[in-house]
Image: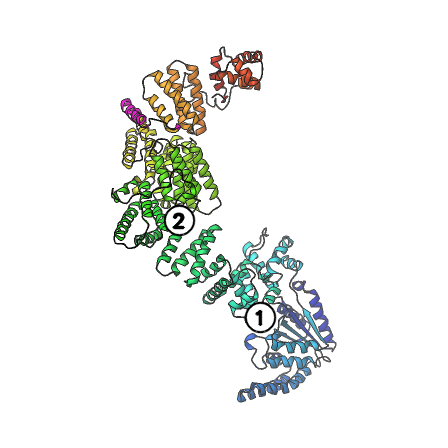
Amino acid sequence: MVARFVEREKQWETLTDLLGSARRGRGRVAAISGPIAVGKTALLERFTEEAVSDGVLVLEAAGSRAERYLLFGILRRILDGAAAFDPAVHAEATALLDGVTAQAVDSGDTAAAVEAGMRVLPHVCASLLRIARDRTVLITVDDVHHGDELSRAFLLCLARRVRQSGVLIVLTEGVRLLPAQLAFHAELRRQPHCTTIRLPLLSAEGTARILSGPFSTAAARLAADCHDTTGGNPLLVKALLEDGLAALGDSEPFQPLAPAETFERAVLDCLHRGDPDLLAVARGIAVLGDAAPAALVARITDVHVRAVELAVQDLTRCGLLHGGSFRLAASRAAVLAAAPPGALSALHQRAARLLHEEGAAALDIARHLLATRKPVEEWAIAVLQEAAEHALVEDDPQLALRCGELAVDSCPDGSRRTALKSRLVSIVWRSSPGAAEGHLRQLSREFCAGRLSDQDLLHAVSCLAWMGEARQAAEAVRGLQAAAQQAEEAGQPIAYAPDTLAAAQSWLSLVSPPVREAFPADGPARAEPAAHGAAPYDMPEDAHLPAAEALRTALRGGPGDAAVAEATRVLQRYHLSDRTLTPLVHAVLALIYAGDLDLALTWIDRLLAECSARNAPTWHAALGVVRAEVALRQGDLPGAAAQARQSMSLISTQCWGVGIALPLAVLIEAETQMGNLDEAMALLEQPVPELLSETQFGLNYLRARGRCHLATGRYHAALRDFLTCGELMQAWGMDAAELVPWRLDAAEAWLAIGNVARAREHVEQQKQRETGPCGVRPRGPLLYALARTSGDLTYRLKRLTEAVELLEQGDDRLQLAKALGELGSAHRAAGDYNRARMFVRKAWHVAKSCGAQPLCQQFTPGQVDGEPVTVGRETEPPREAEVLSEAEARVALLAARGDTNREIATKLYVTVSTVEQHLTRIYRKLKVKRRRDLPARLWDLNLTGIA
């Protein structure tokens, strides 16, 4: 048995038996059938080779679709094979055929020629049978179903006469036969000496045997996956194996074999071996994707439904399809890639229209519209719009972008195209604001012409301001206001509602205050925001105006309750979307500037969680930098730096526009406070937009630069930056310490320069501005600054104690560390070394938790009272800490806080005597003599429970 046909052992044995019967003078006929590319030809060729080696006379021919109308095509090839053995027979038979052919050519009557051919066929058969008198003859015809009518008639005529001869006729044919071939098939099967041999697809075991040749050890492991991929089609199995060998060489595969070029060619080979309908149906199925109804495939391919059903059966039988779909994506891709572009585009167009008529999902229709690669009809524009929105919901912005672009390209100029262009800007903006700049410039021309909707106008203004074009946007809005006023006076319709233009003016004036110059002082009245007591559902449809008013309220200074209430209503009313991203960011900033960091953190984390699963880099970047700002104001320097870096990495610097000022400011200040001065200076070298100084975020950047200059000893440069901040903030009407405490910063710079009087002047100015109720955050730093600029030690101690108490209630741990350190220094100056040590050590721990390395070095243990510095002392507590029992530690902590023995006994539910006994042991173990020595000693032991 030949190894190549181990899987065909049964069929091989049948053919061998039939040949043996022919050797004994008992002629036989064998018809081999099976799916496309199942190995019929390979089996026939191998059997022919074996017969030739055994001395059998082989006469072979093959049918061809291109020659099916050629008279006697197969028969002449059989006779050509007999010419070498018996020239007389060949000459006699050929003369008969030539006569019929000449008659057909002369008369042009095909029917008469066929009838004449039928009359000569018995004579031709008799001539061939004379050859078989003294030898065994094997006549093989591959793809007999492609043979011409007269050749098939000859084979039938011969089959009826070979029973008593040494002739074996072996034919191969397809599973599905055309109507014209059915009569031949039926008559052939009716012969008693005719045997049908059916070739099935390979089993998993058969697949493993083929793979076992090159992959002896991995064949069993690869067989199941290979069989699922190919369906057991030998042609596909061998093609997949060839691709695997080309990729792996002599190595054993550890992963399933991956299809490549050979496999793709084999798929196309399978399709071209079938009828033309087979290829057309395969293309239709590839275009439609998932298992599609036969009726739908028929409509897009112009093939009859019954023919489609039969083609699907054939494709399933040969292993290409499973469940009406391609088994492998690579097979589908190969079919699509090989289709002519024009034909493929037409199929997609038909598919889109038919799916639309049947009410299919917009995304399914849109994929076909995109595949046409040409403008679509009017009905399809709405489908593309809907598909773009669905794609965004499914987090596929690239598909949404393609749908939006095709919709814009297909829509004629007008208001509808303008609306589509506006939505396209939003889609592009989600991934890359820089990429939307070109679309945005076109859109700005549209809104100047009055062709945008009111909401689209506000969104376009917001985007232009982000990209640093606030002044151009302001001029356009001013022009629209003037046009609206003239139209109103003339009784003509206006393009935009006055409130919309007023909201645009309000937004631009907030994010870039210098643009106020574009609007006259007696210009249109500003749109009224919702009343403070209004519910979220009473607010306007667009979020820009209420968000701007909330931030403006926060920047006016004074109590922050009103700003918190307004910002909270904005955050409750509007959900995160392309149009509300920047208003929501500003609403959270309003919470920050109003001093409510806890609420700001809650909302920014909620917004980040909302977009965590969305593929929207711009959203993540804008929200992430606000989260970094919160971390910075809470004293989490490493967290702020990491969050700012991550936000900057999500989109390019160009995409940030003027907004790059905020992440840069956070990062520069965080690196400066952590002591990474080289990194901070390198960040200052990064180019920034020229118009940065005209924006609100530019103030943050200016202050961060000043803090860096201050830390690097460039005190006058720092002072210049701080004073510039003050000039701008006063000119812009947003002189709020929560935004930038420029007076306190300037005072710190004056102190560094050595001019205490000028420093005190700025601090007093800040004090005068904070008359009345004030939040914790601005009051704590102010008290700290008042203490530093005072020469009265008693005054310093009082103010620093107040500052520490206030800052302990707040969130700014970094400022708390500074105040604690300064308080420790003040106590040292007063001679209270124990308290000085306690506060400095607490300052060290707080600074350590913030990641402020320079402060940690400043507050290193031993710096206060002249003790030698011990490296690692704070991270490795003295051994005495291990001696205190848990009960003793609790008593020690309460005693250090100042509780009496009776108060300690009441809190711990023990007797006063027990407390006294514990204290005696505590004094002995810690080597202290007095109760007032406990706080400092406990700080030496790293017991941080002391308040």
- Magenta highlight: main SS: helix
Q: Is residue 889 visible?
A: no
Magenta residues, as a range?
750-776
Count of numbered labels shown in the rendering: 2
Q: Nearer the viewer, residue 766 or 4?
A: 766
The verdict on residue 253 being magenta is: no
Quadrant in which the N terminus is drawn: bottom right
State the mark number for residue 429: 2
Q: Nearer the viewer, residue 776 or 55?
A: 776
* Left or right of 590, for residue 230: right
What's the colour scheme?
rainbow
* Left or right of 321, for residue 493: left
Label 2: which secondary element: helix
| Residue type beneath disc 1 | Ala
- Residue at screen point 55% across, 87% down: 109
- Residue at screen point 34% across, 42% down: 528
Q: Nearer the viewer, residue 331 or 58?
A: 331
State the mark number for residue 307: 1
Label 1: which secondary element: helix
In the figure, residue 582 lies in which quadrant? Answer: top left
Q: CA distance from mark 2 to mark 1?
A: 49 Å
Q: Is residue 142 visible?
A: yes
Q: Give the class, few, some or many, for how many residues have Cα within 10 Å of label 2's Cα (few <14, many ≥20).
A: many
Residue 814: x percent and y percent?
A: 41, 28
* Left or right of 789, for residue 256: right
